[in-house]
C-alpha cells in the first residue's frame, strides 16, 4: 500500500513538474523575445490578424508578431530561437500579404514576421542593357510595377493578381499568362538575400550559394526567409490589346492554346477559362453585350452548356498600332473559335496587369471578399488534359463553378528543375485553377461543404485515373502525402531542410516538417 501511495505522489509531482515547466516555457517566451535588440518591435497582444488568411478557413494564433524594420531584426529573432534549440517550441512564419489558403503563413503559438513592415527598404531600379530591380521580400508586386514603370520598365512574369508579396509568390512559383514564354516568377530572379533557419543572412544566386538559391525558389518558405530579391525587368509597353474568344469544344480550344504557346510569333499573354452553366438565351447575347469589353465574355450566357474562353493579350506602343492590328488578324486567322464571339479591347499596360484588383474592389463592396476560399490549383500533363476535362467538366463540375475556373498550358522548358517546385514530367502541362468562393447562405445548402466535396472528387478522380497531376500551392496534412507530392525529389527536399533549417523552425503552416521538442 505504501508503494502505491508513493507511486501516486510521484505521479502527481511529475505532473506538476511537467505542467509548470510547460507553463514556464510558454510564459517566458514573450519576455525572452522582448529583450532582443530589434529596431522594429514585437506585438504580443494584437496577434489575431496574423492568424487570418485569404482562405478564411484556418486560424492559428501566434504568441508574437514581429514587425521588422531591418533584415537584422529577422536574423536576430531566428538566431535566438535557433540557439534555444529543441528546448523551445517556437516556430517562425514569414507572412507576406497573407493570401495563402490554408494557414500556410501562420505559426501556431510561434512567431509571425510581418514582412510588409520590411518593405520600407527602398526599392532600387537599375536601368541599362540588362535592367533589374532590387526589392524587399515584403514588397507588393503592384508597388514594383508602379516604381519600375517610372523608368519605362516592368517585370516580365506576373501573377494574375498583384497585391501579393515578392517572398510569398517566390515561395510558390508565380504563374500567369506570360509563363509560357518567360517561365514563372521564380525563373525571373537573379539574386536573393535570405535569412536561414539558423539566423544566418546569406546572399545567393545561381553562381554563388546556388544550392540555397534554388532551394528557396518554390521552396514553400522551408529553407529561409527572402528579405530581398533581384528581379529581371524589360521595357514596358504602353498599351495592351486584350482579346477573348469562345469555344464550345474543349479539344479545339486546347489545340489552339497549345498551338499559340508553341508558335514563334505569338501573343504576350495566353490564358483561358471555363464558363459553366450560365443559363439564358445564347441568342440574346448581342443585345446584352458590349463587344468592346472583353470582361463581358465571362458573363456570356451559355444556355447551360460548358464553354471555353481563350484569353489573349498583345502588348504595343501607340505608334505600332497599324502593324499590330495586322499581326493580330494573322494570328487570329489560325484559330477556330466561334466566329461571332470575338471580344476585343484596348487598355493601358497597368490596367491590364492590375485587372483582378477591379474585381476585388467590387467584391469587397458587397462583403464577398472576406469569405472562405476553398481553392484547388492543379498542374496537369498535356497528355492527360482531355481525360481530365471529359470527367471534370463533363461529370463533376457541371452545375456551377462558384467562381472562375482557369485553364491554360505552360512550357516546361522555361522552368528550372534545380528549384524546389514540383511540376509534372511532360514538356507541356496545364494549370487548372478552381477559384471558388463559398458564399454563406442561411437558407440554401452549405456552399463550403459542397465545394470541398467537389474538390475531393476531382482529386480522387486524378488519383484513380493516374493522371500524374501535381498540386500547385499544395496542401497536405500528412508527411506521407508530402512524400508522394515530391516523389523522387523528396530526399533532396529533406536534405535541403536539414542543411538550412535543421530544427524545422520555418514555415510550420505548410505542415511538411514538425519541430522536434
Ligand atoms: P503569404 O500567404 O503571406 O505566404 C505564403 C507562404 O510563403 C507562407 O508559407 C509564408 O510563410 C511564405 N512566405 C511569405 N513571405 C515569405 C518570404 N519573404 N520568404 C520566405 N517565405 C515567405 N499565384 C500564382 O502563381 N498566380 C496567380 O495568378 C495567383 N493569383 C492569386 C490571386 C489571389 C486573389 C490570391 C489570393 C492568390 C493568388 N495566387 C496566385 C497565389 C499566391 O501567389 C500565393 O498564395 C502567395 O503565397 C501569396 O503571397 P502572399 O504574399 O500573400 O504570401
Image (spheres, rainbow, N blue to C red):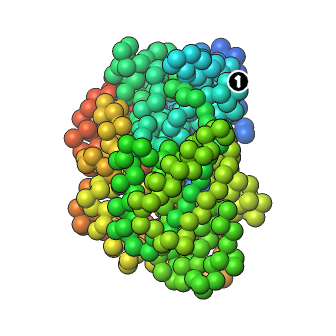
* SS at badge 1: helix
Task: Say if residue 370 shows up in the picture.
Answer: no
Vertical order, 53 against 111 (above or below): below
**Residue visible at 37% across and 20% down?**
206
Residue closest to the eye, 190 or 118: 190
Task: Say if residue 43 shows up in the picture.
Answer: yes
Name the spot of residue 166 as percent of width and height, x first: 56, 33
Point out the quarter of the image occupied by ligand 1. top right
Vertical order, 445 against 501 (above or below): below
For mark 1, what is the residue?
120
Name the spot of residue 420 as percent of width and height, x first: 35, 35
Q: Is residue 483 left or right of residue 196?
A: left
Residue closest to the eye, 355 or 172: 355
**Residue visible at 50% across and 71% down?**
339
Vertical order, 500 against 366 (above or below): above
Label 1 environment density (alpha carbons within 10 Å; few <14, some 14–19, many ≥20)? some
Task: Pick the quarter of the image with the C terminus.
Answer: top left
**Residue visible at 55% across and 70% down?**
341
Name the spot of residue 270 as percent of width and height, x first: 47, 51
Q: Is residue 408 left or right of residue 323?
A: left
Name the spot of residue 212 as percent of width and height, x first: 38, 22
Vertical order, 463 against 73 (above or below): below
**Residue visible at 26% across and 38% down?**
489
Amino acid at each position: 500500500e505504501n508503494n502505491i501511495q508513493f507511486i501516486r505522489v510521484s505521479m502527481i509531482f511529475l505532473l506538476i513538474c511537467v505542467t509548470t515547466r510547460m507553463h514556464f516555457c510558454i510564459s517566458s517566451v514573450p519576455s525572452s523575445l522582448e529583450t532582443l535588440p530589434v529596431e522594429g518591435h514585437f506585438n504580443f497582444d494584437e496577434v489575431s490578424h496574423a492568424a487570418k488568411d485569404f482562405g478564411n478557413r484556418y486560424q492559428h494564433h501566434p504568441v508574437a508578431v514581429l514587425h521588422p524594420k531591418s533584415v537584422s531584426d529577422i536574423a536576430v529573432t531566428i538566431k535566438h530561437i535557433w540557439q534555444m534549440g529543441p528546448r523551445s517550441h517556437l516556430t517562425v512564419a514569414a507572412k507576406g500579404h497573407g493570401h495563402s489558403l490554408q494557414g500556410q503563413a501562420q505559426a501556431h503559438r510561434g512567431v509571425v514576421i510581418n514582412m510588409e513592415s520590411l518593405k520600407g527598404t527602398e526599392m532600387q531600379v537599375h536601368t541599362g542593357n540588362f535592367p533589374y530591380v532590387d526589392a524587399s521580400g515584403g514588397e507588393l508586386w503592384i508597388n514594383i510595377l508602379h516604381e519600375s514603370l517610372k523608368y519605362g520598365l516592368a517585370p516580365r512574369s506576373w501573377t494574375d493578381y498583384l497585391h501579393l508579396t515578392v517572398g510569398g509568390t517566390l515561395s510558390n512559383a508565380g504563374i500567369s499568362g506570360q509563363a509560357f514564354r518567360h517561365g514563372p516568377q521564380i525563373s525571373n530572379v537573379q539574386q536573393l538575400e535570405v535569412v536561414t533557419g539558423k539566423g544566418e543572412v546569406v546572399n545567393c544566386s545561381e553562381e554563388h550559394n546556388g544550392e540555397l538559391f534554388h532551394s528557396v525558389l518554390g521552396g514553400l518558405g522551408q529553407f529561409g526567409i527572402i528579405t530581398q530579391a533581384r528581379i529581371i525587368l524589360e521595357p514596358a509597353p504602353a498599351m495592351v490589346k486584350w482579346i477573348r474568344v469562345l469555344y464550345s469544344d474543349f479539344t479545339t480550344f486546347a489545340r489552339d492554346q497549345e498551338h499559340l504557346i508553341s508558335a514563334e510569333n505569338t501573343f504576350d499573354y495566353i490564358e483561358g477559362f471555363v464558363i459553366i452553366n450560365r443559363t439564358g438565351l445564347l441568342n440574346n447575347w448581342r443585345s446584352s453585350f458590349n463587344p468592346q469589353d472583353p470582361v463581358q465574355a465571362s458573363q456570356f450566357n451559355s444556355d447551360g452548356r460548358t464553354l471555353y474562353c481563350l484569353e489573349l493579350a498583345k502588348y504595343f506602343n501607340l505608334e505600332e498600332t497599324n502593324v499590330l492590328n495586322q499581326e493580330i488578324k494573322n494570328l487570329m486567322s489560325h484559330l477556330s473559335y466561334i466566329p461571332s464571339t470575338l471580344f476585343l479591347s484596348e487598355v493601358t499596360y497597368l490596367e491590364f496587369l492590375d485587372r483582378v484588383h477591379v474585381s476585388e474592389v467590387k467584391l469587397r463592396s458587397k462583403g464577398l471578399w472576406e469569405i472562405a476560399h476553398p481553392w484547388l490549383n492543379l498542374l496537369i500533363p498535356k497528355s492527360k488534359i482531355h481525360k481530365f476535362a471529359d470527367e471534370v467538366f463533363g461529370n463533376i463540375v457541371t452545375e456551377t463553378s462558384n467562381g472562375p475556373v482557369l485553364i491554360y498550358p505552360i512550357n516546361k522548358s522555361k522552368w528550372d528543375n534545380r528549384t524546389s517546385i514540383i511540376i509534372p514530367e511532360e514538356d507541356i502541362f496545364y494549370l487548372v485553377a478552381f477559384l471558388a468562393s463559398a458564399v454563406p447562405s442561411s437558407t440554401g445548402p452549405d456552399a463550403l461543404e459542397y465545394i470541398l466535396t467537389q474538390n475531393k472528387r476531382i482529386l480522387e478522380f486524378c488519383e484513380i485515373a493516374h493522371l500524374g497531376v501535381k498540386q500547385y500551392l499544395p496542401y497536405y496534412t500528412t508527411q506521407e502525402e508530402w512524400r508522394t507530392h515530391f516523389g523522387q525529389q523528396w530526399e533532396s527536399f529533406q536534405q535541403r531542410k536539414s542543411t538550412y533549417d535543421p530544427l524545422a523552425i520555418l514555415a510550420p503552416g505548410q505542415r511538411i516538417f514538425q519541430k522536434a521538442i
